[in-house]
Image (cartoon, rainbow, N blue to C red):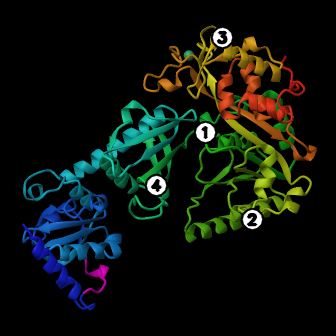
Amino acid sequence: MISLWTRRKAARRWEARPDAIRRRFDAAEAVPISNADELAAMAPGFRRSLSAQFGVEALAGRLNPVQLQDDSVAIFALAEHVAGDQADELARRIAISGYTPARPARYVLAAPLLLAIARQQITAGSLSGAADAPWEQARTALAHAFQDLIEWGVRHGASDIHLNLRLQEAESEVKYTICGRYLAPERFRRMPTSTLLDMLSVAWMDIRGGNGAVFDPHTEQQGSMARRVDGREVMLRWASLAAEAGPSVCLRLLQRDAAARLPDLEQLGYLPDQIQLIDRVMLSEGGAVVFAGTVGSGKSTSLASLIARLPGHRKVVTMEDPVEYEIPGAIQNSLARSLDADAHDSYAAKLRALKRSAMSDVLLGEVRDRETGRAFMDLAGAGVNVYTTVHAPSAALIPQRLASDFIGVSRDFLATPGMLKLLVFQALLPALCRHCAWPVQRLLETGGEHLDGRRLSGRQWAEWLEGVQALYSGDISNLRIRNPQGCGTCRQPSLPELNGYAGRSVAAEILEPGLGGQPSRSAMDCAMLKAFRGDIDPRDIEVRFHAFETQRLKTSGGGAGLAPAPRLWAVT
Ligand SMILES: [Zn+2]
């Protein structure tokens, strides 16, 4: 036991040392240990991890104080962390704690080895005994657990997996985005935080094009990796956020060999008159087609389907981040657009090569900053057909977004006739299961909940329906609502939140700037058209766009109780 007195004396001794002794550690002096055999052979030998004693468990996968067989204390670290402020601070704390610093003082360990020590899967006993590389087993177990998370997501049609770690709490959550809903399946609801942290450290080792050699809970990281699930290749795009409570890692699932299943525009939910309009505009060469929508609204899928409709005599090149769908006949390029200088250089180089490749059509991925904005102007200005996506809340606001300070496309450029050929805004709404959806009248008979959990009486729902009828001329008796019990076709025992739904459907608005003005039908109107066919629950439309009451106020010029709202369109 080390007394407080000894510790104080040691602290004074440390503080009194001349700077020459407290110089920065040179990483070249660290001793490398790359496998369990080398660890077992080190002298003096490894005894135990002191990460708990020094209160640095959260760092232990990168930087770990360890006691050796002669009682001295060394630092085991990853190569990137063996020198630097954190390691120096740890060395200082070892010195003032009264422990004897080991000589040599610091060792560089392979990541899985350090992780296994931090998790106490390697102990002095396991090193001397005949145990069969337990750290290797631990690494395999963590890789399996990660694969399990991915497989569950792929099999349930998830678009994203979210690992939200709370470093101060024993348990953390794993959520999935499925059909646009952010869901916590029972199976992954309470996961040990330390396991998730270790799992992410192991998984990060397979990342390509990532920033950082190791997973770092305290910085934003991005990269991608490939996995196989049920014989299909799945691409994971990793983006982490260093949030207040701990890292929040979002893994976007992209199924790369989706060529056979790239849905056409009709399957996505585009209406026949919309597809006709798109085909008419796409026939002419030159100009830009821009898709807008929120994150996860399926813009890239729609754009891929649209490009797949181009005739074979057009040379199509894509620049994507990364390639999501195989587009027949197109020359596709994946570009990781991380934030480092190399990525900017490779983007510029790719763009130069692209311009010399005599293509007629370019899929540019997302226009989101000045660099991509310049590329957009460069290509569209050269008479190439450009297809791109942008974040904007409606088709009419796409030019404003492109001209914003973030992107910087000039207004004169956008106003040039023919430059903006087609502007599309799309939203994705849950589609009702055709087999079990209830008629809307059920709400009048029994009352029921709105999607925010508010319970309305039958009379209140009757008033709500009158409001719908005042806005839309469709037959409200055709409206249908979700059956929360679901049926044999749609029921998912592990995801009861999705019972009664069957996939998702696009509601789009299309603007042809050459014809000026506004789209003939807003995305919300398009969704209502589908509701009157019994395909979408009207309550989902209120959640996705705005309340019908808001729509009434908008169309009546903001004043309540004025002239009756105009019928927006007739449903035949
Ligand atoms: Zn059903």
Up-down relation of residue 457 to residue 161 (above or below): above
Ligand 1 visible in quadrant = top right
Residue on which the image places disc 3: 444
Q: CA distance from mark 1 to mark 3?
A: 45 Å
Q: Which element carries disc 3, helix, strand or loop?
A: helix
Q: Residues within 10 Å of mark 1 (few under 14, many from 20)?
A: few
Q: Amino acid at mark 3?
A: Leu
**What amino acid is found at the position of numbered circle 1 in the picture?**
Ala
Between residues 432 and 55, which one lies in front from this camera angle? 55
Q: Residue at x 60, y 19 (%)?
A: 482
Circle 2 is placed at which residue position?
A: 374
Residue 441 higher or lower than 342, as above or below: above
Lower position in the chain sequence, tag 1 or tag 2: 1
Residue 57 x %, y %: 27, 58
Q: Which residues fall within the magenta stretch?
A: 22-31
Residue on which the image places disc 1: 259
- SS class, disc 4: loop
Task: Please tell me whether residue 367 belongs to the stretch shown in magenta.
Answer: no
